[in-house]
Amino acid sequence: MNSFELARQKGFIFPGARGWMNTKDARHMEALAQDAALVSTPNATVPAEFLAYIDPMVIEILTAVRNARKIFPEVKKGDWTTPYEKFRVEEFTGVTTPYSDYADGGESNVNENWPAREQYRFQTTIKYGDLEVDMAAVAKMNLASSKQKSAARIIDIDANRFYLYGVAGKEIYGLLNDPNLNPSITPGTAAGGGTAWSGKTANEIYGDILLLWGELKQNSGGNINEDTKLVLALSPESNSQLGKINELGLSVVTMLKNLFGNRLELVELPELYSSTAGNTIMMLARDILGTPVAQLGFGEKYRAGRVVPELSSFKQKITATTYGCILYYPFAVTTMEGV
């Protein structure tokens, strides 16, 4: 008869086994059915991983909105080889004198200037290996595609930042820090003290916006009128204050619509939020006599480089360029700090 020692020598090991079973003998089968002893580890379920539900919906981690393009349009200027761009500023000059048949008094002329803006090139790189791509594929993930989307998102985030703040150390400025902008004005003081909108009534908030509107008209010398399309840019927190109502049941938004109609657009800019000095609001004109007040310049929006194969991986460079916000009429932008 076979012994467990002999079986062990052959490589068959049965820890805890007490005897051999003759499958042809019904008595042994009945004894097995009545035997509660187990050879394997006791278990009553399956691994929890097999029961988990893998949701096909992918939840993307969100960042603050990028709304610079809602204020001014993007315009392609040259390509990524362009070092800088120039635009012509023309001013008409001259005087008149009393008329005489024998005089040529008075003279008209034109003064030309050529301001320039540099172009800044920026890049990001994606890399993915054969093993990580195959491992991601097991989880139904297209890793290369996700990394390409990530590069596009990072390029977009920085482009928006350059449109608002420019590029330090270069002649590239943003809408919020162009050196030609007029100084910010101060909001009115609430009846209870302070200038923050959180402590103001609907009428007091409306009064601040009227103050900003008056400053904008005054700076324009009449070039901004009742037909000019306007933008009121403000932080999400300041925008929420426009829902306050006055004693007549009118919200600030309603009062603004009554005054400006559909020519005033509200745009949220998270970058106008400040936790210390108070939020900033900005009112600006989109164009003056058909000429844009500003443009968001770029040479290349998204330039995908070649996919470079390595021994067991790939890499790819993504490039973009920017001129920042090219502000043609600084007087058409007015800001107020401390709301």
Image: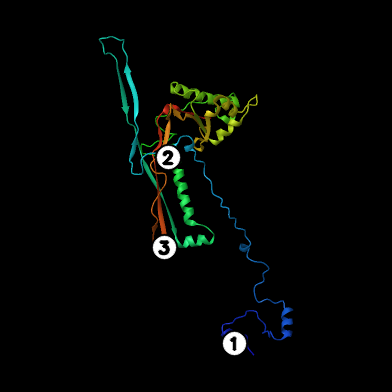
What amino acid does circle 3 point to?
A: Ser
The residue lying furthest to the bottom in this view is 1
Q: What element carries label 3?
A: loop
Image-based side of 61 in relation to 82, left or right: right
Left of 233 or right of it: where is 307? left
Reading the image, the residue beneath label 1 is 6
How far, Cα to Cα, is label 2 from label 1?
80 Å
Question: How far across and down, in percent of the image, does residue 90 sit?
Answer: 34, 26
Direction from residue 140 to residue 122 in the image, left or right: left
Q: Position of residue 225 (x, y in %)?
A: 48, 23
| Front-most of residues 166 and 261 | 261
241 or 150, which lies in front? 150
**Quadrant of residue 139 within the rendered picture:** bottom right
Q: Which of marks 2 and 1 is in front?
A: 2
Q: Mark 3 points at which residue?
A: 312
Asked whether the residues under the numbered discs 3 and 2 touch, taking CB atoms below 8 Å apart as contact, a structural biologist would say no
The quadrant where residue 99 appears? top left
Q: In the rendered image, which residue does mark 2 sit on?
A: 162
Residue 183 shows in the view: no
| Secondary structure beneath label 2 | helix
Please tell me which of labels 2 and 1 falls first in the chain. Answer: 1
